[in-house]
Image (cartoon, rainbow, N blue to C red):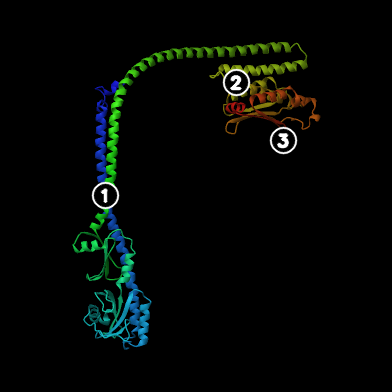
Amino acid sequence: MPLRALRSKGSPLLYRMPGSALVLMVCAVALLLTLGLSASFALRDRAAALQHAQDTAGNASLLVAEHAARLVETSDLILKQAVQLAGPADAPLPSDRAAWERYAGLVRGTPYLVSIWLFDAEGNAVLSTRRFPTPAMNVADRDYFEAQRAGGSAAGGRLFITALDNSRFTQEPLILLSRPLAAAPGQFRGVALVAVSPRYVRDIYKSFDFDYARSITLRRADGTVLLHETQGPDATDSAAAEAAGEPEISALRRVDSVPVTAEVAIPVSSVMERWRGQLWTYISYALAALAAVSVIGGMALQRARRERQAENALQHAYDTLEERVHQRTAELEQTNAQLETAVTDKEILLKEVQHRVKNNLQVICSLLRLQAARIDEPARRAFDESLRRIQCMSLMQELLYRSDQPARIDFADYLRQLCDGLVRSTNPTGARLTVNAPQPWSLDVDQATPLALIASELVSNALLHAFPLGHPGTITVELLPEGSEGMRMVVRDDGTGLPPDPSTQNRANEKRQSGLGLVLVKALAQQAGAQVTIDRQPDGGPGTRFIVSVPTLAKTQTKAA
């Protein structure tokens, strides 16, 4: 198509627009697309940051709840041991040095326990691991004591968890777990209490790998705060945000088998602060992309102007080249017509030559037959062999004349016709001849000619000399594939076979062992690039087997090169 046709009225609009306008349009689209994609990615990351914070809070609440469950479980186990050490319902509460040592051993074996206390029915301290002797203290007005006294022994020794804002012994908040002491039915004997230090719990929470400021809260079922801890890289800001009532991402989870809930809260401002820090990355990429588009657009505008100038020069060259191509095409068409005529004439001439060669060979055969009738028996045998070889060549010329490919022949078809002619003309003992060539095999005439003579020599030799005693036998000719690219021709008979020692051969097999036929077979095999193998008594039976291993034409040419 000429270049001017691209800007004609019938062409699409984009082809009719100037190159500079197209460049400006593409740059504008690229700028808008860059800004749109940057904004889309930023919003997507904002949603992903909020979702990540939500997932983080949920996973953290699961860890906090699991840790709180194990903490309460182990602390309650110590508390039950303390109740058991307090003795049965009718026993006085222990307060001696030996009991103190036993209770102190329980505290020393548990790093997060601060102390163990025993209180009597009036709320007076009977034993404390903080000091011996036990200091005077009354807790009758405390919520845990009132709850245990109200429940009494009928409550089955239920666990009560509460918090103590400030202990005069530790000067820090404590988590208190209490159970009633064993008492008679309807009676109240006192309370056993263990104090857990939140410092240990905070140390565990600090090991959690968070990316945000967060607060961790443990509450009772009635909402009483047992532990509240603000942690993270922006802990101060998180506490201020919580106090100001700013939005938070929180996850609430109930502690297993304990009336306690764990809550993890992440301020939204902490999540947005990190997202805004990542936002500069998108802004940088967007600015870089805009700068790149601007530079490339400017270069494209300059290139469009130069291409417009080159287009006019190219149009002139195109017109000139199109005219020369038309001229050259006409010349080539004329030359091709002449070549086709010459090829047709050559094929006709080759067919005519093959036909005349076949006729001439037939004339030679007829002359040899007339001449053979006038000579004695020994000389007639040589005439018969020459006549057979000439007939072999004549049959090949006839098949070439009939073939669609003047230079190639189907060797399997040729082998069947050759053996049919030999068994009808040269078979003094009436031997049976079978040919097994299941698939066609196309060969070049240069390779097929020596192979045809080899087959003629081997088959006629077997017909004449394999059965000297006159009894009929069987001769088998096979043409089968060998390997991936070769073929194998086998001529086998079940006659007398060749003697293993040349000194013992008689006149009947002298021709088979060392006559002209075997010499011709070896010479023709070398010409065809084949290998001849003679197998006396094949498979341990009578007869002889000749194996001719034939490579393909391609392999023969490669080997010759």
Residue shown at 31% from the left, 89% from the top: 92
The 10 Å Cα crowd at callout 3, few under 14, some 14 to 19, many 20 or more, is few
The 10 Å Cα crowd at callout 2, few under 14, some 14 to 19, many 20 or more, is some
Q: Which residue is mark 3?
A: 541
Q: How many marks?
A: 3
Between discs 1 and 2, the one toward the N terminus:
1
- Position of residue 317 measured from the top left corner of the image (x, y, whole percent): 35, 18
Q: Quadrant of residue 408?
A: top right
- The type of residue carrying mark 3 is Gly
Local secondary structure at mark 1: helix
Q: Which mark is residue 445?
A: 2
Between discs 3 and 2, the one toward the N terminus:
2
Image-based side of 502 in relation to 125, left or right: right
Asked whether the residues under the numbered discs 3 and 1 touch, taking CB atoms below 8 Å apart as contact, a structural biologist would say no
- The type of residue carrying mark 2 is Val
- Position of residue 355 measured from the top left corner of the image (x, y, whole percent): 59, 13
Local secondary structure at mark 2: helix
